[in-house]
Amino acid sequence: MYNNILDRILETKKEELDGFQMPEPMPRSEKYSLREALSRPHHALGLIAEVKQASPSKGLFREKMNVPAIAESYEHAGADAVSVLTDRTYFHGSAENLIKVRKSVRLPVLRKDFIIDERQIEEAFRIGADAVLLIAAALEPDLLYELYLAARERGLESLVEVHRIEEAEAVLSKFTPEIMGVNNRDLKTFETKLEVTAALQGTIPEDVVLVSESGVQSAADVMYLKNHGADAALVGEVLIRAHSPREKVRELFGREVNEHAARA
Ligand SMILES: O=P(O)(O)OC[C@@H](O)[C@@H](O)c1c[nH]c2ccccc12
């Protein structure tokens, strides 16, 4: 029936959109640029730290999540941006979580969801997101480009996510996003291999900010990505599971990685 989890998620998303309610616009605070933040990161490798309570592959990461406290600890640890899952069904996310993060940090906030309809872009704008995720595996190139333009019209940036070279080439044959994500997670097996980022670095143009997503577990992983073309990493599970997200960021992105980069 589904050749991967994404097909199942997208079917649910389409049903959810039938009952879609557009939220009232939040008062917009300052606009933060994700591209700018990732172009001059606090550490040797940029960091988008993720607020994600559960996932289809791993289940629940935490019973309860103090979202403002987690977001603040990310900011104090030197994250360059915060990614917030707003998908409710499979990730226990919510628009409310994004609003809480928006109110807690002075950083770019990325809306992480399965966006297939312009109404979700308008919603992202209204709840205070600075950027949205657009998943190439979920969108035909024309629709992906339309949603990218719809985001840009609202002053929102897009992180265009690919899983393999063919997807990247299909996107790049149409337009060049300012920020691209390489998702190291195989949507069929849920296995993550950081080599996926290394394999794609030659395909993604130099002037595109390259974010490696998923599977980062250690400082060695961060150094590997730094040495294989990534400008930033998007990290969720290890941070959300950590007793102290702030300590975990320091362990993964801190001194050792900065010293290594300085020597390189
Ligand atoms: O928890 P991890 O392995 O650090 O992965 C984070 C992030 O990359 C992952 O949550 C993700 C990447 N792309 C997505 C698209 C939808 C939902 C989730 C994602």
Image: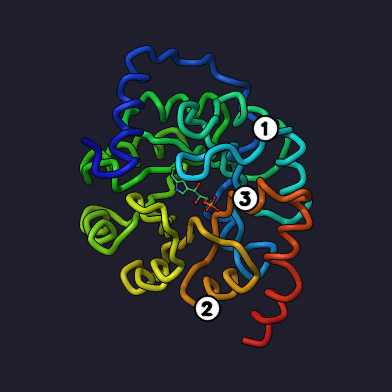
Distance from label 1 to label 3 (Cα)?
19 Å
Quarter of the image with the C terminus is bottom right
Q: Which mark is residue 227?
A: 2
Where does label 1 land, which residue? Answer: 63
- State the CA–CA distance, disc 2 to disc 1: 36 Å
| Residue 231: percent from left, percent from top | 52, 66
Q: Which residue is mark 3?
A: 49
Amino acid under disc 3: Ala
Q: Quadrant of the N terminus?
A: top left
Q: Amino acid at mark 1?
A: Glu
The residue sitting at 77% across, 46% down in the picture is 73
Q: In the rendered structure, which disc, 1 or 3, sits on the residue that comes first in sequence?
A: 3
Q: In the image, residue 106 lies at what x, y percent?
A: 71, 42
Q: Earlier in the sequence, mark 2 or mark 1?
A: 1
Left or right: 230 as drawn, with respect to 6: right
- Residue at the spot x=67%, y=87% of the render? 263
Amino acid type indicated by mark 2 = Asn
- Residue 150 lies left or right of residue 2; in this view the side is right
Q: Is 26 or 215 nearer to us in this picture?
A: 215
